[in-house]
Image: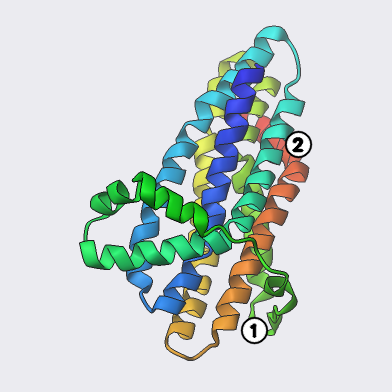
Amino acid sequence: MSKILIQTMILTAIIHIIDTLSYSVRLNSVKSKQYILSTSLFNIFVLFSRTANTFLSPLIGAIVGLAMAEKINPITEIRLIIFSATIGTIIGTMLIPTFLKIFSIAVSKLEVSGSIPLLMIKSLSVNNIKKAAQKATLPKKSMITRLSIKNIPKGLLLINTFITGIYTIGILASFYAALFVSPEKRLAVSASSGMVNGVATILLTIFVDPKAAIITEQSIKGERGYQDVKTLTILLMGSKLLGTIIGQLLLLPSVRFLAWIYS
């Protein structure tokens, strides 16, 4: 099981690194005034993240299946996977300054080439990879000390924290709940993972993304300062990090709830 667990943890961390980096696209779009172009380019990263997420189900299913066969409780493995989501979010946050520099260059080159496949091929050259490594930059303390939260909706951060917590444990809770239902219902409760994550994605689309987009658009139009978007981005990343931690607390109640529904 250890090999599958390591693979699952690495994949989970990568998914959350990409999800965390997605918050920084707003900063680049405000600076470059190229919101649509920036969003179009980052959709490639989001597509990769969503595709990678589909590979989690069989890996987690394998972990739970082996636990059933060996008649052990995989709670430690489940919590380690959630912990890897937290680590991925932290790594993604640390990579933000470097990512913004590289992403900004990529957006300007996309405007010239007009082709995402061509841009990706050129980006994978040894010379460009070396240049990207040279642009590595660590976050500065001023990112935190200069935050001004008075113009940021507090409810937005609370909602993002809770939804992130649900999204983090959606697949895990569904498969883990299969241990606590009758054998004929295990496939049904495991299959509910897509429904749980789907609901979390819908809630993000309805309650978080529109408000964040409005604040970004207002900054592009000059109705808000750039600092508001920067503060929003950092606080959303912080609430995402908190959401992955809260996921540890939500795990068992969610498992009991799912098991109760299918029992």
Q: Nearer the viewer, mark 2 or mark 1?
A: 1
- Secondary element type, mark 2: helix
- Residue furthest to the bottom in view is 223
Residue located beneath label 1 in the image: 151
Query: Which residue lies at the image location 70% right of the left edge and 75% below the top edge?
Result: 142
**Quarter where residue 253 is shown:** top right
Q: Is residue 124 left or right of residue 80?
A: left
Position of the N terminus by quadrant: top right
The color scheme shown is: rainbow
Tag 2 near tag 1, CB within 8 Å: no
Of mark 2 and mark 1, the one earlier in the sequence is: 1
| Residue situated in front as seen by the camera: 137 or 49 | 137
**Percent position (x, y) of residue 250?**
74, 44
Q: Is 19 on the left-hand or right-hand side of 103?
A: right
Residue that mark 2 sits on: 252
**Whole-percent x and y of residue 106?**
36, 61
Residue for point 28% across, 54% down = 119
Q: At 55% from the left edge and 87% from the top edge, which residue is drawn?
A: 225
Q: CA distance from mark 2 to mark 1?
A: 36 Å
Q: Horizontally, is 75 left or right of 139 in the view?
A: right
